[in-house]
Amino acid sequence: MSVKDGLQDFKEFWKEFSKVKQGLVGLGLLLAFAFLGIFGPLIVPFPGASKHWRDIDYWQDNPQAAPPAWTNFFSARKGVSSSTLAAITAETEALEGGASIASFVFDYPFFYDQPPRDLILRVPGSGQVPLSVTLERPDGLRAELFREQVELSEGSDNRVSVARNCAQAAVEFVRGRDAQLADGMNADLIKPVDIFFAKLGPDILGSPVTLKGDYKIEIRALIVSPGFRVGKPSILVSGHVSGILGTDASKRDIFTGVVIGIRWALVIGILTSVISVVAGVLLGIIAAYFGGVADWLLSRLYELIYLLPVLPFLIVVSAIFKPSIWTLIVLICAFFWTGSFKTVYSMTLQIKEETFVEASRALGSGKWRIVFKHIGPILLPYSFASMALSIPAIIVYEASVSLLGLGDATIVSWGQILESALTQGAVINKLWWWVIPPGLMIALMGMSFAFLGTALDKILHPKLKTR
Amino acid sequence: MYRYFLLKRVGYGILMYVVMICVFSTLFNGVADRTMRAQIDEEVAQEASRLRNLNEGQLKAAIASRRESKYRQYHLDESLPSRIFWRSVRTLGFDFGNSTIIKASNGDRAVSRIVLEALPRTIVLFSSEVVLVTILGVMLGLYAARRPNGPFDRTNSMITMITNGLPAWWLAMLAIMAFSYRFPIFPSGGIHSNPAPTHFAGFLDYLWHLSLPLMTLVFLGVWGTAYLVRNIVLSTLQEDFVTAARARGIPERKILFGHVLRSSMPAIMTLAILGLFGSIAGNIIVEGIFGWPGIGNLYFIAVQQNDVPILMATLAIETLVNMLGFVILDLAYGLLDPRIKVGGRA
C-alpha cells in the first residue's frame, strides 16, 4: 500500500465520515480538547499551577472559596473581582548624597458594594528600604497605610498585606477624623480594608458602607545606598469573586485546574485505550489463529478478568499499593484488553478460513507474517472504533479512584479536584462552581469520544452497516 | 440435558471464584499478613495486661508462647505458599477475621458480621433500582421504537451517549447539593432520621432516605436500558410474524404490547440485568456519597480508614456477587432462549 493509496482511502473515509453529524460534533469537541490540552497551560491565569497545585504558598493571594467573577452580574451586592494593578506613573527623584526616592502611583476605580478582601503589595528589589504607602480616597481624605523600613531581597516575595499589616494604620486613620470613634476600635478585631474603603461615619465599625469612586495608592521608597534597588511594584486586589470558575477552599483557581486536567484525562484515556485495544486485538488474533495452548490459556485469562469486578479491584489495589498514575494505567489496561478480545477472536476465526489467507500460506508465508500482514489490517478499523468507545469508561475509572483519594498526587486530574470538593465540604456549602465544572468536563469528554466512536463504528464496522 | 448444563455452569463458576480468591490472597498476602500479625500482637498484649501475678521473665515467656500459638492457629509461621493457601481457605469459608477500626452496630469487630449487616441494605437499593429501571426503560424504549429516528428517539439516544460517560457519584454530589442543601427536600444521607421513628412512620422515613439515592441511580440507569429495549424491539418488529399480524389488521398498539414486547421480553430482561450487574460495582461510590450504609459505603469507609480486613472481605463479596450474577444469567439464557443449545456439543 503506497502513500497515495492511503490518501485515497482516507479521502473516501472522510467523505463518509463527514456525513455523520454526530461524528463531526465529537471530532470538533475532541480537537478543542486537544488544543486546550496542548496550549492550555499557556492561556490559564496561573501557568505554574500544574507544578504547584498542592503548594499552599502559590495560591495564597487568591480569595478562599470565591464564586466566579461573572456571578456579580446576577447578584444584588456586587463583589470585587480579583485583579492586579500596575503603576500608572513611576518616578525617581534624586536626592543629595546618592540617595533617591522612587514613587509609584496606582489608580483603582472602585464601584462595588463590598470592600475588597485584601490589597497585597509586592515590591521587588533588594536592601533596607524605608517604604511608605498612602491611600487617597475619593472623598479627598488621605490615609497612610504603611510606613516602615522593610528588608527587600531579590527573588523572594516582599509582600505587604493591608488586611494583615495595616490594622494600626486604620485606627490612626479614623483617629485623625474622629478620636472618640477611634477609641472604640481594637486593632486586633477590625478589618482594615473595610475601613479604608468605607464612608467615614459612626457606622464604620458595625456596618460600613463602601465609598465608591477613584482611589489612588502611592508607594514611595527611599533608596539610601546605590547598592539597593527597588523595582516596579504591583498591587493585587483580592476580591470576593475570582476568575472564570472561582476558587476552591484552598484558594486554588478552578478554571486553571480544570484546563490542566484536560491534558491528564487525554493522556490517561488515549494511552490506556490504545495499549489495551492493541493488546486485545493482538491476543485475540493469536488465540484464534494459533489455537491450542495459546487459545486455552488466553481464553481462561479472559474469563478470569472478565468476571472480576473492575472498580472494587482497582480501588483495593490502589488503597494497598498506592500506585503512580502509570501503574494505574497498566492496571486499567489489564482489564480493558478483554473488551476487544472476544470480537477479534471470532472475527479471526472467520478470516483464518478465507482463501487469501490460505493462498498466502500456500505461498510460504510464516504465521506472524499472516497475522501482521493479512489479519491485522482487516481488524485495524474495528480497533479504532473500539478505542474511542472505551475511553469514557477509562476516564471515569481514573476519576473514581481519584475521588477516593487514591490518585497520583503528582498530577492534577478532574477526579482529584472533585475529591477535594467532596472532602472539603463543597457539597454542604453549596460551592457549585467547584463541583460542576470538573464533572461536566468528564461528561463532555466522554460524550465526544462516544460520538466519535459510534460514528467510526457505523462507517468502519461492516456488520453494523446493515441497518 | 439442562441439569447437566446447570451443574457444569455452577461448577465452573465455583472454580473461577476459588481461582480469584487465590489470586487475591497472593496479591494482597503481604499487607494482609502484616495486619493480622499486628492484630494478634495487640490482642496478646491486651491479654498480658490482665496477668498480674507474674514476674517479668514469666510474663515475657507467656506472651511469646501465646503469640506463638496464635500464629500457629492462623498458619502465620509457615512458608509463603502455605500462608497463601490457608488465607484462601479462610476467605472461601467466609472467615474474614476482625476489622482494625470499623465496628458493627453492636460494637462487634467480626468482619463477616459487619458485612452481613451492610449487605441487605445494598440489596434493597440495588433491587429497587433494577425494578424501576426496567419498568421505566421498557416504557421509554417502546415509545422510542414506535417512531425510530423520530425526535423522541434521537433525544433518547443522545442522552444515552451523554450519560454513558457520566460518573454516577458526580450526579449524586449534585443531587445532594441541589435537593438536600439548596432546596432541603431530601435528607443528605443515612438510612433513617435520628431518633428513628418506629412502625409505619419508620417505614416512610426509610423510603424518604432511600428516594434520593434511588432517583439518582434510576435517572442515570434508565437511558441505557431504554436504548437497549429500543434496539431489541426494532429488530423484533422486522420479524415475519409482526408483518403477518399487521396484515391481519391487528392494531399497532396491540402488536407492540402483545406480540413484540412478549417475544422480546427474555432478551430485554437478561440484557437489562446484565447491564445493571455492571453498575453494582459503580454503585460503590454512590452509596458512599449518600452515606447509604451498604457494602459500597463500607468500602468507602474502609478505604478512608485503611481497614485492610474489611477491604479484603468486601472485595471477596463483590466478586462473589458478580460471579453469581453471571452464572444466573447464563442459566437464564439457557432456560429462556431455546435457540441457545444447552448441553450439546458446539
Image: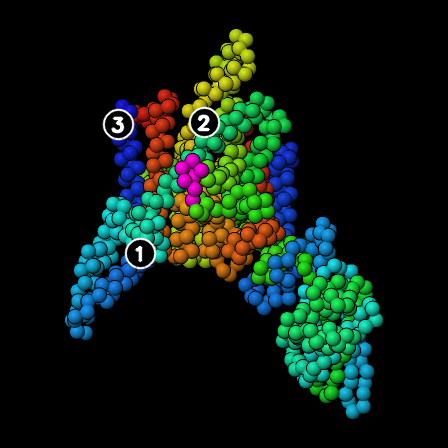
Residue at 60% from the left image edge and 53% from the top image edge: A431
Q: Are marks 1 and 2 in contact (CB under 8 Å)?
A: no
Q: Position of residue A243 (x, y in %)?
A: 67, 57
Tell me if residue A31 comes above or below residue B47 in the rendering: above
Q: Position of residue A101 (x, y in %)?
A: 78, 83
Earlier-in-chain disc, 1 versus 2: 1
Tell me if residue B18 comes above or below residue A324 in the rendering: above
Query: Which quarter of the image is occupied by the N terminus of chain B?
Result: top left
Viewed as shown, does residue B328 lie left or right of B151?
left
- Residue found at the very far bottom of the displayed protein: A97
Tell me if residue A442 comes above or below residue A12 in the rendering: below
Secondary structure of residue under mark 3:
helix
Residue at 77% from the left image edge and 89% from the top image edge: A98
Foreground of the two, A85 or B82: A85
Q: Which residue is mark 1?
A: B32
Task: Identify the chain of the residue marked 1, using the numbered disc in the image.
Answer: B
Q: Are marks 2 and 3 in contact (CB under 8 Å)?
A: no
Disc 1/disc 3 C-alpha distance (Å): 39 Å
- The secondary structure that dominates the magenta segment is helix
Give amino acid for label 3: Tyr
Is residue A44 found inside the magenta-colored segment of the image?
no
Q: Which residue is mark 2?
A: B268
